[in-house]
Amino acid sequence: MTLAIALEPTPIETDAYGIVRVAKTRVTLDTVVTAFLEGCTPEEVREQYPSLQLSDIYLVIGYYLRHRDEVNTYLAERQLQANLIQQEAEQRFSPIGIRDRLLARRNQSR
Protein backbone atom coordinates (compact mmCIF):
# COMPACT_ATOMS: atom_id res chain seq x y z
CA MET A 1 0.00 0.00 0.00
CA THR A 2 1.31 3.44 -0.94
CA LEU A 3 0.62 6.44 1.20
CA ALA A 4 -0.27 9.52 -0.79
CA ILE A 5 1.51 12.41 0.86
CA ALA A 6 -0.08 15.78 0.35
CA LEU A 7 1.32 19.09 1.46
CA GLU A 8 -0.95 20.94 3.84
CA PRO A 9 -0.98 24.72 3.50
CA THR A 10 -0.46 26.60 6.74
CA PRO A 11 -3.86 27.93 7.81
CA ILE A 12 -2.85 31.54 8.39
CA GLU A 13 -3.98 34.69 6.62
CA THR A 14 -3.09 38.35 6.88
CA ASP A 15 -6.14 40.57 7.21
CA ALA A 16 -6.64 44.06 5.79
CA TYR A 17 -4.93 45.57 8.85
CA GLY A 18 -1.81 43.40 8.57
CA ILE A 19 -2.79 41.11 11.44
CA VAL A 20 -2.11 37.41 10.93
CA ARG A 21 -5.10 35.26 11.88
CA VAL A 22 -5.65 31.50 11.98
CA ALA A 23 -7.87 29.77 9.41
CA LYS A 24 -10.66 32.26 8.82
CA THR A 25 -11.11 32.90 12.54
CA ARG A 26 -10.59 35.96 14.68
CA VAL A 27 -7.83 34.16 16.62
CA THR A 28 -4.45 35.73 15.94
CA LEU A 29 -1.12 34.06 15.30
CA ASP A 30 0.10 35.95 18.39
CA THR A 31 -2.45 34.14 20.53
CA VAL A 32 -1.50 30.63 19.43
CA VAL A 33 2.26 31.21 19.52
CA THR A 34 2.15 32.93 22.91
CA ALA A 35 0.08 30.11 24.40
CA PHE A 36 2.54 27.57 22.97
CA LEU A 37 5.54 29.49 24.35
CA GLU A 38 3.85 29.64 27.76
CA GLY A 39 3.66 25.85 27.78
CA CYS A 40 0.14 25.15 26.53
CA THR A 41 -0.36 22.02 24.49
CA PRO A 42 -2.30 22.26 21.22
CA GLU A 43 -5.19 20.52 23.02
CA GLU A 44 -5.19 23.21 25.72
CA VAL A 45 -5.17 25.93 23.06
CA ARG A 46 -8.15 24.19 21.44
CA GLU A 47 -10.00 24.21 24.77
CA GLN A 48 -9.41 27.96 25.12
CA TYR A 49 -10.29 28.74 21.48
CA PRO A 50 -12.97 26.31 20.29
CA SER A 51 -13.25 28.09 16.92
CA LEU A 52 -9.86 26.57 16.02
CA GLN A 53 -9.40 23.10 14.60
CA LEU A 54 -6.80 21.02 16.44
CA SER A 55 -5.07 20.18 13.16
CA ASP A 56 -4.79 23.90 12.35
CA ILE A 57 -3.19 24.57 15.73
CA TYR A 58 -0.56 21.91 15.07
CA LEU A 59 0.11 23.38 11.61
CA VAL A 60 0.46 26.90 13.04
CA ILE A 61 2.88 25.70 15.72
CA GLY A 62 4.83 23.84 13.07
CA TYR A 63 4.97 27.00 10.98
CA TYR A 64 6.27 28.91 14.00
CA LEU A 65 8.96 26.29 14.65
CA ARG A 66 10.12 26.45 11.02
CA HIS A 67 10.03 30.27 10.84
CA ARG A 68 10.94 31.39 14.36
CA ASP A 69 12.97 34.44 13.36
CA GLU A 70 10.30 35.86 11.06
CA VAL A 71 7.46 35.15 13.50
CA ASN A 72 9.41 36.55 16.46
CA THR A 73 10.10 39.72 14.45
CA TYR A 74 6.38 39.98 13.63
CA LEU A 75 5.45 39.42 17.29
CA ALA A 76 7.94 42.08 18.44
CA GLU A 77 6.48 44.58 15.96
CA ARG A 78 2.96 43.80 17.18
CA GLN A 79 4.05 44.28 20.80
CA LEU A 80 5.65 47.62 19.92
CA GLN A 81 2.40 48.74 18.23
CA ALA A 82 0.40 47.62 21.26
CA ASN A 83 2.69 49.57 23.59
CA LEU A 84 2.36 52.72 21.46
CA ILE A 85 -1.43 52.42 21.39
CA GLN A 86 -1.51 51.93 25.16
CA GLN A 87 0.69 54.98 25.73
CA GLU A 88 -1.51 57.07 23.45
CA ALA A 89 -4.66 55.92 25.23
CA GLU A 90 -3.14 56.63 28.65
CA GLN A 91 -2.15 60.13 27.53
CA ARG A 92 -5.68 60.83 26.31
CA PHE A 93 -7.44 59.10 29.22
CA SER A 94 -5.30 59.06 32.33
CA PRO A 95 -5.61 55.79 34.27
CA ILE A 96 -4.54 57.56 37.46
CA GLY A 97 -7.49 57.74 39.81
CA ILE A 98 -9.80 55.82 37.47
CA ARG A 99 -11.11 53.60 40.25
CA ASP A 100 -12.05 56.60 42.36
CA ARG A 101 -13.73 58.34 39.40
CA LEU A 102 -15.73 55.22 38.55
CA LEU A 103 -16.82 54.71 42.15
CA ALA A 104 -17.84 58.38 42.41
CA ARG A 105 -19.85 58.09 39.18
CA ARG A 106 -21.55 54.93 40.45
CA ASN A 107 -22.41 56.58 43.77
CA GLN A 108 -23.92 59.60 41.98
CA SER A 109 -26.29 57.39 40.00
CA ARG A 110 -27.76 55.77 43.14
Image (cartoon, rainbow, N blue to C red):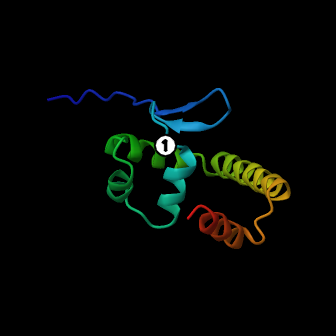
Q: Nearer the viewer, residue 47 or 73?
A: 47
Estimate how packed mark 1 is, as few (under 14), some (14 to 19) or many (20 or more) residues with alpha carbons within 10 Å: some
Task: Check the image and report above or below for 70 versus 9.
Answer: below
Label 1 secondary element: loop
Q: Residue at x 49, y 51 (%)?
A: 32
Asked whether 63 or 85 is in front, the reply is: 85
Identified at 75% across, 65% down, the residue is 95
Residue 60: give x, y in percent of width and height: 47, 44
Q: Please name the amino acid that badge 1 sits on.
A: Val
Residue 106: give x, y in percent of width and height: 60, 65
Q: Is residue 97 left or right of residue 24?
A: right
- Front residue (pair 44, 7): 44
Residue in the image at 49% along x and 43% along y: 27
Residue designated by label 1? 27
Measured as percent of width and height from the top left, residue 24 is found at 45, 30
In terms of image quadrants, where is residue 16?
top right
